[in-house]
Amino acid sequence: MYKILANTIFLGKDIHFLSDCHSSNDIALQLVREKRAKEGTIVICANQIKGKGQRGNSWESESGKNLTFSLILQPDFLDVTEQFYLNMAISVAVRRVLSDYLPDIQVKWPNDFVIRGFGKIGGILIENSLGYKSWEYAIVGIGLNINQQAFSTAGATSLRLMTGSSFDLEELFRLIITQIEQVYIRLKQAAFALIKKEYLSYLYLWEEWETFETRSGLLKGKISGLDPLGRLELRLENNELQSFDFKEIRFPRI
């Protein structure tokens, strides 16, 4: 299962498949610390017991129904201030594949995949190790709800629930990894503007007036862009522009 990929240059040439694990990100981190990994190493887990989500949340996944895996990358060609470009590149690549089946899929900043009115279908969690001037490595955890049909948490959906079809996990995995490699290479070629433009074009609530929860209270505004550090920019009703880090703002329910 999950054979070495033949149609990629470096991603998926070293695949560690586990039937059960607590977190594929934790296993990937262990491989890095033990110097048993290289750029492009992938850890994939059929049954992830304690998958991680954003804000310290857990990620629910039924065994053998979804895609839960982690990539090990070394994006040392990026400055430490350019970290969010990696988030955007991975989000763009995954969305490209999923949009072949769900054209209405959007990216909710910073890196969740959602269907308006139905909920979240997947997400990305990137854990970085930074050196003095550059990244030592990035562990890119990806969780996608594919064939699961029942969820104990509200606001979750899957590819199968949205389309009525079941999917070959290995085939989807191959398509996603191939697309990630292609966009990652474009990132290496400094295609920052193109990647950011595509990311923003599918951003959930882009240029829509909405009420957001912030540390200073409720704010009505519309997402107008991202600042150089990847923070979300809101244009308020008085035309003031404010930037927010991930833990400083909450979106309304999808």
Image (cartoon, grey):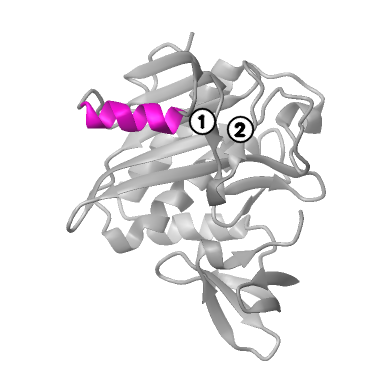
The residue lying toward the viewer, choosing from 33 and 11, is 33
In which quarter of the view is residue 215 placed?
Answer: bottom right
Whether residue 228 is visible to the viewer of this picture, yes or no, is yes
Please state if 164 lies on the left or on the right of 50 as rendered: right
Whether residue 208 is visible to the viewer of this picture, yes or no, is no
In which quarter of the view is residue 72 placed?
Answer: top left
Mainly helix, strand or loop, the magenta region? helix
The residue lying toward the viewer, choosing from 56 and 178, is 56
- Can you give x and y, in whole percent of width and height, for residue 6 in the image? 38, 16
- Can you give x and y, in whole percent of width and height, for residue 118 in the image? 80, 44
Residue 246's disc is none
Please state if 141 lies on the left or on the right of 48 as rendered: left
Q: Is residue 164 above or below residue 115?
A: above
Give the Cα separation between the discs numbered 1 and 2. 11 Å
Residue 176's disc is 1
- Can you give x and y, in whole percent of width and height, for residue 67 in the image? 57, 25
Range of magenta residues: 24-34
Residue 125 falls inside the magenta stretch: no
Secondary structure of the residue carrying tag 2 is strand
- Can you give x and y, in whole percent of width and height, for residue 54 in the image? 55, 48
